[in-house]
Amino acid sequence: MTTTYELTHLRGLEAETVHVFREVAASFERPALLFSGGKDSAVMLHIATKAFWPAPLPFPVLHIDTGHNFDEVIDFRDRTVRRLGLRLLVGSVQDDIDAGRSAEQPGAGRNRLQTQTLLRSIGEHRFDAVFGGARRDEEKARAKERVFSFRDEFGQWDPRNQRPELWHLYNGRHRKGEHIRVFPLSDWTELDIWQYVLDEGIELPSIYYAHRRTVFERDGMLLATNPHLTPGEDEQPYEATVRFRTVGDTTCTGCVPSTASTARDVVAEVAAARVTERGATRADDRISEAGMEDRKREGYF
C-alpha cells in the first residue's frame, strides 16, 4: 500500500515562501524584511516567523516611512513589532527632505521619494538582501520580476538583466555595493493572500475591512480626506462605507465601496473582482503607462 502526501495550493505556496526565507538566511550576511503594516508584508512576516520558529527572526524589519501614513497602519505596525519582539528600523522620507537629499513637489505625493530613502537605508545598514512583499499579479512591471531581483551598485533594476530561476534554484551572487531584492510572495495572488489570512487568522489593520469614512472622488477613485489630502473646490466630500484593498501613502491610496467586514467576506469580494488592487486604488500607478517600471529602474520596491 502506497501513501501519498499532497500539499494544498496554499500550503504549497507557503512551503515555497519558507524555502526562499531559509535560502536567503543561509546565503546572505545582512538581510532585512520590508514591513509597512500592509497585508502582504503582514503575511510575509507571518511566514518568516514560521520559517525560523522557535528561534527569533534572524534579521530586522525595515519600514520606509513617508510621514503620510494611515494611523491604523502605524498602530498595527508598532503592535506587531512589540508582540513578536522584532527589531524595527525606520527610514524617514522627511529626514531626506530636511537634509536636502529629496525635494517634495507641491501637490504631489511622497511615494516616489521613498526610493531615495530606501537606497539610503540599505547603504547605511549595509543590507545585501531585502525582502519585499510584491506579487506578480499586482502590476505588469512586477510581473517581470524574478524572486531574486538583482540590483546594481546604484540600486537600479534592469528588466533585461534578469537571472533564470529554473526548478526554484536562485542566484544571489553580487559584488560589494550591489544587493538583491527578494520577493517571497511572487507567485501569490490577492485571493491567495486573503484565503491565507482567513485560514491562519492573521491580524491586519482595521482599514482593510468595511468602515465608515469621509471620502471624495478624484479621477475615478475614492480618496479619503486626511490631514495630508483635502478635496478641491469641485470635489464634494461625503461619508461612505468603504475598505482599502492596498495600503500606502494617504495622498495616493484609494478605497473601494464595500460591506466586507470579515476576512471571509473579503475572500468572496476579491474572488469576484476583475481589477487588481493597485489598478483600482493606487493613483501613483497612473502617472504613465510604464510608471511602476520607471520607478523600479530607479530603485523603487
Image (cartoon, grey):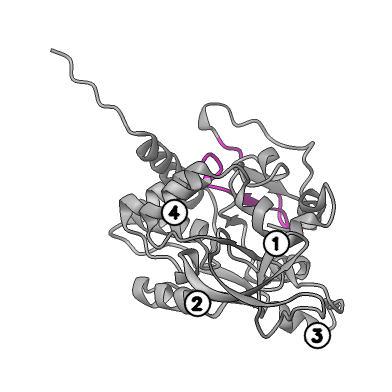
Answer with mark 2 or mark 3, whichever residue precedes in sequence: 2
- The residues colored magenta run 170-189
Residue with the mark numbered 1 = 221
The outermost residue toward the left is: 1
On screen, residue 31 above or below 85: above
Q: Which mark is residue 266?
A: 4
User: Which residue position is annotated with label 2?
Assistant: 72
Q: Is residue 48 visible?
A: yes
- Judged from the image, the secondary structure of the residue bearing numbered disc 1 is strand
Q: Nearer the viewer, mark 1 or mark 2?
A: 1
Coordinates of residue 30 in the picture (x, y in percent): 55, 61
Magenta stretch encompasses residue 156: no
Query: Alpha carbon of mark 1 to alpha carbon of mark 2: how far?
Result: 21 Å
The location of residue 126, given as percent across then percent down, is 64, 65
Q: CA distance from mark 1 to mark 3?
A: 34 Å
Please state which of residues 53 and 74 is positioned toward the viewer in this rendering: 74
Give the residue number, with chain letter if any, for mark 3. Answer: 99
Q: Nearer the viewer, mark 3 or mark 4?
A: 4
Mark closer to the chain start, 4 or 1 = 1
